[in-house]
Amino acid sequence: MLKINQLHKSYPIGKSSLHVLKGIDLEVETGEMVAIMGSSGSGKSTLLNIIGMLDEADSGDYILDGVPIKNLNEKKAAIYRNKFLGFIFQSFNLINYKNALENVALPLYYQGLKRKERQEKGKFHLEKVGLLDWAHHLPSELSGGQKQRVAIARALAADPKLLLADEPTGALDTTTSYEIMEFIQQLNDEGKTILIVTHEEDIANMCKRIVRLKDGLIMEDKKVNQVRASQYV
Ligand code: ADP
Ligand code: MG
Protein backbone atom coordinates (compact mmCIF):
# COMPACT_ATOMS: atom_id res chain seq x y z
CA MET A 1 0.00 0.00 0.00
CA LEU A 2 2.76 2.43 0.92
CA LYS A 3 6.50 2.45 1.22
CA ILE A 4 8.62 5.17 2.75
CA ASN A 5 12.39 5.30 2.58
CA GLN A 6 14.72 7.61 4.50
CA LEU A 7 12.20 10.39 4.84
CA HIS A 8 13.44 13.71 6.23
CA LYS A 9 11.53 16.84 7.13
CA SER A 10 12.63 20.09 8.74
CA TYR A 11 10.74 23.26 9.53
CA PRO A 12 12.49 26.62 9.30
CA ILE A 13 12.50 28.58 12.54
CA GLY A 14 14.06 31.97 12.07
CA LYS A 15 17.53 31.46 10.68
CA SER A 16 17.86 27.88 11.88
CA SER A 17 15.60 24.89 11.40
CA LEU A 18 13.88 22.17 13.36
CA HIS A 19 14.71 18.67 12.09
CA VAL A 20 11.47 16.78 12.83
CA LEU A 21 11.77 13.57 10.78
CA LYS A 22 15.31 12.22 10.57
CA GLY A 23 15.16 9.25 8.26
CA ILE A 24 11.89 7.38 8.55
CA ASP A 25 11.52 3.95 6.94
CA LEU A 26 8.01 2.55 6.93
CA GLU A 27 6.10 -0.01 4.95
CA VAL A 28 2.37 -0.61 5.28
CA GLU A 29 0.52 -3.44 3.54
CA THR A 30 -3.08 -3.44 2.39
CA GLY A 31 -5.46 -4.32 5.23
CA GLU A 32 -3.21 -3.20 8.07
CA MET A 33 -4.37 -1.06 11.00
CA VAL A 34 -1.39 0.84 12.34
CA ALA A 35 -1.07 3.19 15.31
CA ILE A 36 1.56 5.90 15.08
CA MET A 37 2.59 6.87 18.60
CA GLY A 38 5.01 9.26 20.20
CA SER A 39 5.02 12.14 22.63
CA SER A 40 3.65 15.53 21.68
CA GLY A 41 5.92 17.20 19.15
CA SER A 42 7.55 13.95 18.04
CA GLY A 43 6.44 14.44 14.44
CA LYS A 44 3.38 12.18 14.24
CA SER A 45 1.20 14.73 12.46
CA THR A 46 4.08 15.75 10.23
CA LEU A 47 4.50 12.14 9.11
CA LEU A 48 0.77 11.62 8.63
CA ASN A 49 0.47 14.85 6.64
CA ILE A 50 3.27 13.75 4.34
CA ILE A 51 1.64 10.33 3.91
CA GLY A 52 -1.63 12.18 3.22
CA MET A 53 0.06 14.43 0.64
CA LEU A 54 -0.93 17.50 2.61
CA ASP A 55 2.75 18.27 3.07
CA GLU A 56 5.96 17.27 1.32
CA ALA A 57 9.16 15.74 2.66
CA ASP A 58 12.51 17.45 2.13
CA SER A 59 14.12 14.23 1.02
CA GLY A 60 13.49 10.51 0.85
CA ASP A 61 11.14 8.35 -1.18
CA TYR A 62 7.44 7.81 -0.76
CA ILE A 63 5.51 5.39 -2.91
CA LEU A 64 1.74 5.22 -2.49
CA ASP A 65 -0.14 2.44 -4.24
CA GLY A 66 2.73 2.08 -6.69
CA VAL A 67 2.89 5.79 -7.47
CA PRO A 68 6.05 7.74 -6.51
CA ILE A 69 4.85 10.83 -4.67
CA LYS A 70 7.34 13.50 -5.58
CA ASN A 71 7.20 16.85 -7.31
CA LEU A 72 3.56 16.43 -8.21
CA ASN A 73 1.83 19.62 -9.19
CA GLU A 74 -1.15 20.75 -7.09
CA LYS A 75 -3.69 19.42 -9.55
CA LYS A 76 -2.15 15.95 -9.77
CA ALA A 77 -1.69 15.83 -6.01
CA ALA A 78 -5.35 16.72 -5.49
CA ILE A 79 -6.45 13.98 -7.85
CA TYR A 80 -4.37 11.32 -6.06
CA ARG A 81 -5.48 12.62 -2.67
CA ASN A 82 -9.13 12.38 -3.67
CA LYS A 83 -8.73 8.95 -5.17
CA PHE A 84 -6.56 7.24 -2.55
CA LEU A 85 -7.02 8.98 0.76
CA GLY A 86 -9.63 9.70 3.40
CA PHE A 87 -8.90 11.92 6.40
CA ILE A 88 -10.25 12.06 9.93
CA PHE A 89 -9.09 14.78 12.32
CA GLN A 90 -9.27 15.37 16.06
CA SER A 91 -11.34 18.51 15.56
CA PHE A 92 -13.64 16.87 12.96
CA ASN A 93 -13.07 19.69 10.41
CA LEU A 94 -16.69 19.73 9.29
CA ILE A 95 -18.01 22.75 7.45
CA ASN A 96 -20.20 24.54 9.98
CA TYR A 97 -22.76 26.02 7.62
CA LYS A 98 -23.35 22.74 5.77
CA ASN A 99 -25.55 19.99 7.16
CA ALA A 100 -24.35 16.45 7.81
CA LEU A 101 -25.38 15.14 4.39
CA GLU A 102 -23.79 18.08 2.56
CA ASN A 103 -20.56 17.56 4.49
CA VAL A 104 -20.47 13.87 3.58
CA ALA A 105 -21.34 14.55 -0.06
CA LEU A 106 -18.75 17.29 -0.57
CA PRO A 107 -15.78 15.06 -1.59
CA LEU A 108 -18.04 13.53 -4.23
CA TYR A 109 -18.49 16.95 -5.78
CA TYR A 110 -14.73 17.06 -6.35
CA GLN A 111 -14.96 13.64 -7.95
CA GLY A 112 -17.35 15.10 -10.48
CA LEU A 113 -20.46 13.19 -9.43
CA LYS A 114 -23.87 14.59 -10.29
CA ARG A 115 -26.00 16.03 -7.51
CA LYS A 116 -28.38 13.07 -7.33
CA GLU A 117 -25.52 10.56 -7.10
CA ARG A 118 -23.84 12.67 -4.43
CA GLN A 119 -27.02 12.71 -2.38
CA GLU A 120 -27.54 8.97 -2.72
CA LYS A 121 -23.97 8.06 -1.87
CA GLY A 122 -23.94 10.57 0.95
CA LYS A 123 -27.06 9.04 2.45
CA PHE A 124 -25.63 5.54 2.09
CA HIS A 125 -22.55 6.51 4.08
CA LEU A 126 -24.52 8.43 6.70
CA GLU A 127 -26.64 5.36 7.18
CA LYS A 128 -23.50 3.26 7.59
CA VAL A 129 -22.44 5.42 10.54
CA GLY A 130 -26.00 5.32 11.92
CA LEU A 131 -26.81 8.98 11.30
CA LEU A 132 -29.28 9.01 8.44
CA ASP A 133 -31.89 10.62 10.71
CA TRP A 134 -29.45 13.49 11.29
CA ALA A 135 -28.79 14.19 7.60
CA HIS A 136 -30.27 17.69 7.72
CA HIS A 137 -28.75 18.80 11.00
CA LEU A 138 -25.85 21.22 11.19
CA PRO A 139 -22.63 20.18 12.96
CA SER A 140 -23.50 22.53 15.83
CA GLU A 141 -26.57 20.38 16.54
CA LEU A 142 -24.53 17.19 16.85
CA SER A 143 -22.56 15.72 19.75
CA GLY A 144 -18.80 15.21 19.45
CA GLY A 145 -19.20 11.52 18.70
CA GLN A 146 -21.84 12.25 16.07
CA LYS A 147 -19.61 14.87 14.45
CA GLN A 148 -16.78 12.38 14.25
CA ARG A 149 -19.10 9.81 12.69
CA VAL A 150 -20.12 12.36 10.07
CA ALA A 151 -16.42 13.01 9.46
CA ILE A 152 -15.84 9.26 9.06
CA ALA A 153 -18.74 9.03 6.61
CA ARG A 154 -17.21 11.92 4.67
CA ALA A 155 -13.79 10.24 4.68
CA LEU A 156 -15.36 7.06 3.32
CA ALA A 157 -17.63 8.67 0.74
CA ALA A 158 -15.09 8.55 -2.05
CA ASP A 159 -14.09 4.98 -1.12
CA PRO A 160 -10.41 5.70 -0.38
CA LYS A 161 -7.85 2.90 -0.26
CA LEU A 162 -6.18 4.37 2.79
CA LEU A 163 -7.80 6.04 5.79
CA LEU A 164 -5.67 8.47 7.79
CA ALA A 165 -6.78 9.56 11.24
CA ASP A 166 -4.94 12.15 13.34
CA GLU A 167 -5.96 11.73 16.99
CA PRO A 168 -9.53 10.81 15.97
CA THR A 169 -10.56 10.30 19.60
CA GLY A 170 -8.54 13.19 21.02
CA ALA A 171 -11.58 15.40 21.60
CA LEU A 172 -13.94 12.67 22.80
CA ASP A 173 -14.72 11.13 26.19
CA THR A 174 -13.61 7.54 26.80
CA THR A 175 -16.93 5.82 26.02
CA THR A 176 -17.40 7.80 22.80
CA SER A 177 -13.75 7.16 21.88
CA TYR A 178 -14.30 3.43 22.11
CA GLU A 179 -17.50 3.67 20.04
CA ILE A 180 -15.55 5.46 17.34
CA MET A 181 -12.73 2.91 17.58
CA GLU A 182 -15.22 0.07 17.29
CA PHE A 183 -16.46 1.62 14.10
CA ILE A 184 -12.94 2.10 12.75
CA GLN A 185 -12.12 -1.52 13.62
CA GLN A 186 -15.16 -2.68 11.65
CA LEU A 187 -13.90 -0.73 8.63
CA ASN A 188 -10.57 -2.49 8.97
CA ASP A 189 -12.37 -5.85 9.31
CA GLU A 190 -13.93 -5.06 5.93
CA GLY A 191 -10.44 -4.60 4.51
CA LYS A 192 -9.77 -0.88 4.74
CA THR A 193 -6.15 0.06 5.41
CA ILE A 194 -5.96 2.47 8.34
CA LEU A 195 -3.28 4.62 9.98
CA ILE A 196 -4.13 6.25 13.29
CA VAL A 197 -2.03 8.84 15.08
CA THR A 198 -2.62 8.69 18.82
CA HIS A 199 -0.77 9.25 22.06
CA GLU A 200 -3.17 7.04 24.02
CA GLU A 201 -1.99 3.49 24.75
CA ASP A 202 -5.53 2.07 24.96
CA ILE A 203 -6.36 3.41 21.50
CA ALA A 204 -3.06 2.14 20.06
CA ASN A 205 -3.78 -1.33 21.45
CA MET A 206 -6.99 -1.39 19.42
CA CYS A 207 -4.82 -1.38 16.28
CA LYS A 208 -2.85 -4.37 14.96
CA ARG A 209 0.57 -2.75 14.88
CA ILE A 210 2.22 0.06 16.81
CA VAL A 211 4.93 2.31 15.38
CA ARG A 212 6.62 4.55 17.95
CA LEU A 213 8.40 7.76 16.97
CA LYS A 214 11.10 9.32 19.10
CA ASP A 215 13.57 12.06 18.28
CA GLY A 216 12.63 11.95 14.61
CA LEU A 217 13.13 8.21 14.19
CA ILE A 218 11.07 5.06 14.56
CA MET A 219 12.22 3.57 17.84
CA GLU A 220 9.82 0.62 17.85
CA ASP A 221 7.62 -1.11 15.31
CA LYS A 222 5.71 -4.15 16.52
CA LYS A 223 2.61 -6.20 15.85
CA VAL A 224 0.11 -6.36 18.71
CA ASN A 225 -2.88 -8.49 19.61
CA GLN A 226 -5.77 -6.23 18.78
CA VAL A 227 -8.00 -5.29 21.71
CA ARG A 228 -11.59 -5.10 20.49
CA ALA A 229 -13.32 -1.84 21.38
CA SER A 230 -16.70 -3.62 21.46
CA GLN A 231 -15.87 -5.23 24.80
CA TYR A 232 -16.01 -1.77 26.40
CA VAL A 233 -19.13 -0.33 24.76
P1 ADP B 1 2.99 15.67 16.93
O1 ADP B 1 1.86 15.50 15.98
O2 ADP B 1 3.75 14.41 17.21
O3 ADP B 1 2.60 16.35 18.21
P2 ADP B 1 3.99 17.54 14.93
O4 ADP B 1 4.31 16.71 13.74
O5 ADP B 1 2.73 18.31 14.91
O6 ADP B 1 4.08 16.63 16.24
O7 ADP B 1 5.18 18.56 15.18
C1 ADP B 1 6.53 18.17 15.30
C2 ADP B 1 7.38 19.39 15.60
O8 ADP B 1 7.39 20.24 14.46
C3 ADP B 1 6.87 20.24 16.75
O9 ADP B 1 7.97 20.73 17.48
C4 ADP B 1 6.12 21.35 16.06
O10 ADP B 1 6.13 22.52 16.84
C5 ADP B 1 6.90 21.53 14.78
N1 ADP B 1 6.05 21.97 13.65
C6 ADP B 1 4.97 21.30 13.17
N2 ADP B 1 4.44 21.94 12.11
C7 ADP B 1 5.21 23.05 11.92
C8 ADP B 1 5.19 24.13 10.98
N3 ADP B 1 4.28 24.18 10.00
N4 ADP B 1 6.14 25.09 11.11
C9 ADP B 1 7.09 25.02 12.07
N5 ADP B 1 7.16 24.04 12.98
C10 ADP B 1 6.25 23.06 12.91
MG1 MG C 1 -0.14 15.97 16.12
Image (cartoon, rainbow, N blue to C red):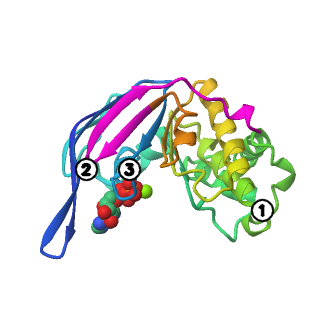
Name the kind of residue labelled 1 in the image: Leu
Q: Which mark is residue 215?
A: 2
Distance CA(mark 2)–CA(mark 3)? 11 Å
- Residue 231 is covered by the magenta coloring: yes
Q: Secondary structure at mark 1?
A: loop
The residue identified by callout 3 is 44
Residue displayed at 25% across by 50% down? 215
Between marks 2 and 1 in the image, the one whose residue lies nearer the viewer: 2
Q: Nearer the viewer, residue 182 or 28?
A: 182
Pointer 2 and pointer 1: residues touching (CB < 8 Å)? Answer: no
Mark toward the start of the polypeptide (2 vs 3): 3
Q: Between tags 1 and 3, which lies in front?
A: 3
Question: Which residues fall within the magenta stretch?
Answer: 210-233
Q: Is residue 108 magenta?
A: no
Disc 3 marks a residue whose amino acid type is Lys
SS state under label 2: loop
Residue 178, disc: none
Residue at 67% across / 53% down in the picture? Answer: 148
Q: Earlier in the sequence, mark 1 or mark 3?
A: 3
What secondary structure is marked by label 3? helix
Residue lying at the far left in this picture: please name it. 15
> Where is mark 1, residue-wise?
142
